[in-house]
């Protein structure tokens, strides 16, 4: 179909007048023939089955019957009247009931004529009733464009009230296909369709609205899902390619003395293969003139920090400065300490800049940044302030990315003539497939291997009644020289209840673990940064054995000697948070434990979350479960990516097709970056059409 036909106002469709068109526009944002045909059913009812009255069950399921109306009467009630019709087939009878529109319906009903009726049945006083059935004369039913699987379109209250029922919707689709069937432009190339066994666009649209069989419906859906995901991927991949071509960065041409000296003399362990692989990917990126925009995914404890340090050394070797940004002060502190330690023997100036940095220190930092003496600046959001100016910032490392948005990434760009290379590190393992659609504009590296010698963390679910044995266990572990985290949920920073829980917990722990045998620390968001720091330091250096805390310790805290994580009211935490928290232990050579304390009454979702935690430590498995439980809307980044506005694809279910679409998009653009080849004519046309519509987000990040 020519494009202008696709854009034709639905008012030109027979049976759609101004009023209906207006309603469709307001309620469903359907304006054109194209919009209407892309309004897909959200489910299907199997209408191959006809029931007999005697076989009906009280299941509230929708059923379809064939029979005749043998009597009609009106029952008067306090509020209006109710119309009752007796419906019979050869096996028995039931009652059809209308509470509304009785008068009008009564006139239109024909007795002793065969109808096909459809609806939900209720059992009432031993009689089945079907309120507000959908009905059609058998003769019409046979004539109409019937398919075994009846599409159900989502509706709104307003539409239903104004008489646009599912039946009316179907009729409209029927009209649309009578007029336009087989006139829809093909949007994929023949090559793609052959390669992936996809049916034509026209046929797919037809099968989705009027499925001839389950099998054909599946084919139609697959084709349309592929198409939808393919064009999202095409845009993402293309933007990425354009960026690489257009956006020049600094080429770090050499791996020099600092890197080599550190690598041979001070690297405290040998890198895992995964770390080596990722480092190589980063080296290739920063070595080219195209600016790097890379997402480094690695489960908690997989060793991202050392990758960051080595990348930083490459930047320094080429004469550039490095910024490392963390989401919390605790984490920035910890990075500062860890990295200062690692690099203590090297001639490198490292400073920490956070909200609590003193004016004098700040001034010195600003100065040294601008004159180029300062090599690595570590900090929080404070790094984004305009006052923070670099002489030649070459690499920005952003840790625990889920707390920083795209906008913040962009702000770091502006600190320079050319944009620095950007390495985003995240321990929230976004399922790979989702990452592909959400972060299609970033290149992705994955550390998919833990350092050797790690013991699997043992996780258990415990209840209040188990508290004594948990205390006993804690004492045993402390006797072995281990340290313990106890974490309380803090839903709202301001929630007094949560603080009460925390303080009560702290008191009872202090009672159970009295001085001088035991030392207990506490850390929470209401404390002054300096106090927090002090307490953290006490724990990190082994002066206290137990750290009672809120989730401020969630990200990144690294105390290898801590081997027990106890999570109070674990049911209140989300899966990825639980996983993050658990990741605080299991960092040393000792066997580590995670104890999830829960209340007895758990919601189904909470049970799934806790059970998942007990069963697996694989961050990617956990992320998949999380995605299934919460839906993609709650996963960071999905808003910008358009994956939420999908018409037919389901980012969770359709991961296999998503992968196909991703690779197809890459292949085509590698082969034909401007879609200039004749064989890709359809794709170019459809792509331009989409760009025209969605131009706005084509330029994000
Ligand atoms: P994360 O990926 O969670 O940021 P870290 O970088 O904090 O992980 O590393 C976790 C722990 O593992 C640290 O104590 C670190 O020193 C150690 N580590 C990292 N890489 C290796 C390795 N290749 N071999 C042994 N230990 C390692
Ligand atoms: Mg980390």
Image: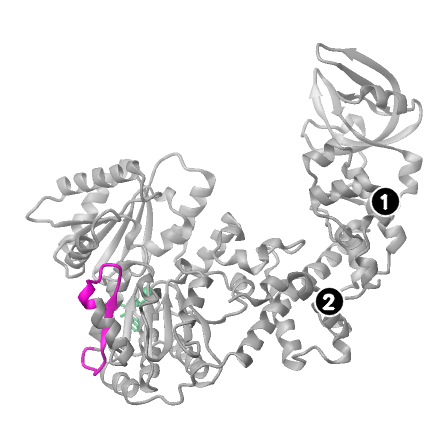
Quarter of the rendered image showing ligand 2: bottom left
Horizontal and vertical percent position of residue 312: 33, 78
Q: Main secondary structure of the magenta part?
A: loop
Specify whether residue 574 is in view: yes
Specify whether residue 587 is in view: no
In the displayed structure, does residue 269 sit left or right of residue 600? left
Q: Nearer the viewer, residue 57 or 670?
A: 670
Q: Quadrant for residue 534, please give it.
A: bottom left
In 3D space, how far apart are the residues under numbered discs 2 and 1 (Cα atoms)? 31 Å
From this view, report whether residue 246 is shown above or below residue 110: below
In the displayed structure, does residue 336 sit left or right of residue 517? right
Horizontal and vertical percent position of residue 590: 23, 62
- Which residue appears at 17% of the width and 53% of the height? 531
In the displayed structure, does residue 400 sit left or right of residue 114? left
Is 159 included in the stretch rendered in magenta? no
Mark 2 vs mark 1: which is more N-terminal? 1
Q: Quadrant for residue 582, please give it.
A: bottom left
Q: Which residue is mark 2?
A: 686
- Which residue appears at 26% of the width and 66% of the height? 353
Q: Nearer the viewer, residue 223 or 512?
A: 223
Q: Secondary structure at mark 1?
A: loop
Horizontal and vertical percent position of residue 50: 81, 36
Residue 146 is tagged as 1
User: Which residue is farthest left?
Assistant: 516
Residues at circles 2 and 1 in contact by the CB criterion of under 8 Å: no
Range of the magenta residues? Answer: 344-361
């Amino acid at each position: 179909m020519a494009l202008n036909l696709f854009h034709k106002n639905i008012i030109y469709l027979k049976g759609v007048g101004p009023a209906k068109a207006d309603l469709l526009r307001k309620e469903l944002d359907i304006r054109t023939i194209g919009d209407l045909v892309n309004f897909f059913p959200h489910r299907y009812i199997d209408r191959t089955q006809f029931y007999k009255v005697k076989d009906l069950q009280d299941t509230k399921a929708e059923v379809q019957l064939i029979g005749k109306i043998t009597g009609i009467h009106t029952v008067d009630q306090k509020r209006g009247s109710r119309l009752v019709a007796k419906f019979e087939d050869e096996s028995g009878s039931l009652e059809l009931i209308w509470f509304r529109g009785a008068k009008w319906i009564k006139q239109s009903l024909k007795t002793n004529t065969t109808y096909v009726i459809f609806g939900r049945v209720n059992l009432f006083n031993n009689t089945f009733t079907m309120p507000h059935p959908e009905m059609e004369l058998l003769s019409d039913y046979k004539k109409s464009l019937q398919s075994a699987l009846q599409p159900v379109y989502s509706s709104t209250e307003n539409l239903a009230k104004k008489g646009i029922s599912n039946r009316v919707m179907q009729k409209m689709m029927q009209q649309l296909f009578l007029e336009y069937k087989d006139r829809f432009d093909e949007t994929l190339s023949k090559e793609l369709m052959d390669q992936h066994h996809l049916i034509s666009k026209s046929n797919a649209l037809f099968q989705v609205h009027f499925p001839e069989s389950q099998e054909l419906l599946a084919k139609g859906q697959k084709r349309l899902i592929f198409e939808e995901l393919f064009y999202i991927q095409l845009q993402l991949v293309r933007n990425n390619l354009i960026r690489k071509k257009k956006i020049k960065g600094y080429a770090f041409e050499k791996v020099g003395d600092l890197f080599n000296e550190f690598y041979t003399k001070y690297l405290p362990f040998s890198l895992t293969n995964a770390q080596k692989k990722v480092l190589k990917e980063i080296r290739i990126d920063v070595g080219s003139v195209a600016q790097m925009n890379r997402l480094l995914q690695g489960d908690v404890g997989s060793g991202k920090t050392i990758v960051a340090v080595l990348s930083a050394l490459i930047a320094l070797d080429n004469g550039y400065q490095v910024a490392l940004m963390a989401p919390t002060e605790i984490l920035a502190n910890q990075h500062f300490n860890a990295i200062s330690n690692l690099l203590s023997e090297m001639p490198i100036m490292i400073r920490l800049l956070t909200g609590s940095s003193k004016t004098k220190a700040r001034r010195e930092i600003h100065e040294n940044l601008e004159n180029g003496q300062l090599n690595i600046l570590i900090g929080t959001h404070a790094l984004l302030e305009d006052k923070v100016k670099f002489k030649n910032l070459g690499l920005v490392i952003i840790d625990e990315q889920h707390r920083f948005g795209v906008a913040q990434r962009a702000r770091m760009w502006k600190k320079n003539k050319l944009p620095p290379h950007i390495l985003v590190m995240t321990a929230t393992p976004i399922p790979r497939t989702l990452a592909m659609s959400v972060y299609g504009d970033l290149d992705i590296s994955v550390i998919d291997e833990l350092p050797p010698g790690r013991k699997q963390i043992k996780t258990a679910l415990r209840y209040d009644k188990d508290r004594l044995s948990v205390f006993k266990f804690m004492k045993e572990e402390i006797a072995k020289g281990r340290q313990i985290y106890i974490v309380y949920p803090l839903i709202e920073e301001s929630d007094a209840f949560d603080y009460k829980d925390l303080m009560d917990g702290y008191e009872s722990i202090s009672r159970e673990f009295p001085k001088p045998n035991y030392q207990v620390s506490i850390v929470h968001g209401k404390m002054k940064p300096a106090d927090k720091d002090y307490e953290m330091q006490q724990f990190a250096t082994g002066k206290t054995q137990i750290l009672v805390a809120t989730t401020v310790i969630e990200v990144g805290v690294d105390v290898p000697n801590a081997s027990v994580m106890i999570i109070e009211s674990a049911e209140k935490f989300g899966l990825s948070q639980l996983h993050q928290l658990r990741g605080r232990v299991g960092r040393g050579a000792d066997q580590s434990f995670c104890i999830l304390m829960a209340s007895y009454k758990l919601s189904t979702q909470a049970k799934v979350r806790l059970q998942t935690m007990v069963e697996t430590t694989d961050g990617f498995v956990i992320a998949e479960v999380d995605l299934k439980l919460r839906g993609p809307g709650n996963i960071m980044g999905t808003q910008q990516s358009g994956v939420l506005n999908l018409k037919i694809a389901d980012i969770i279910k359709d991961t296999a097709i998503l992968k196909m679409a991703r690779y197809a998009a890459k292949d085509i653009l590698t082969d034909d970056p401007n879609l200039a080849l004749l064989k890709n004519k359809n794709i170019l046309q459809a792509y331009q059409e989409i760009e025209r519509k969605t131009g706005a987000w084509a330029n994000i990040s």
